Amino acid sequence: MTPPRNPDGSGWGSSPTPKELSAVLALAAAKLPSLEVDWDYGRLTGAYLINLGSARTAQVLRITDLLRKGLRCERRADGV
């Protein structure tokens, strides 16, 4: 079973697929080794959740750093 996609075939609703998220994290030298879709929950509710799984502290710190930098850039672009 594949995750739902937009009618034009792009993306996964308004969320990235685990594969897309993994690819972006890999570009930034970050990794979530247990990233997966919660298919059971999705079949029951129609809402497909992404389990981020376990990660080493260094990886979580790297992802946190990336999020901070991204938020700073977004705020600058918004003029905040």
Image: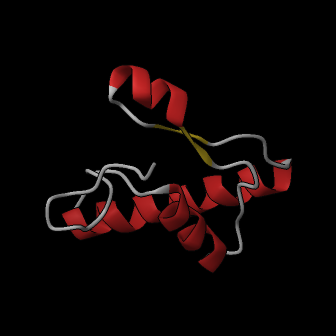
10 over 42 or under it: above or below: below
Expressed as whole percent of the image width and height from the top left, the position of residue 9 reads: 23, 67
Q: Residue furthest bottom?
A: 27
Q: Quadrant of the C terminus?
A: bottom left
Residue at 40% across, 57% down: 16
> How far across and down, in percent of the image, does residue 22 sit?
59, 64
Occupied quadrant, residue 66:
bottom right
Judging depth in this view, the residue of 37 and 75 nearest the camera is 37
> Residue at (41%, 36%) from the top-left corner?
48
The residue furthest front is 1
Q: Position of residue 21 (x, y in %)?
A: 52, 62
Horizontal side, residue 45 vs residue 64: left or right: left
> Is 51 placed left or right of 70 in the picture?
right
Q: Does 78 sit above or below residue 60? A: below
Q: How many marks?
A: 0
Residue that protrudes farthest toward the left in the picture: 7
Image position, residue 58 (x, y; %): 83, 56
Q: Image check: 50 left or right of 73? A: right
According to the image, what is the colour scheme of the structure? secondary structure
- At horizontal 54% and vertical 64% (from top left) the residue drawn is 19
- Between residue 34 and residue 75, name the one nearer to us: 34
* Quadrant housing residue 31: bottom right
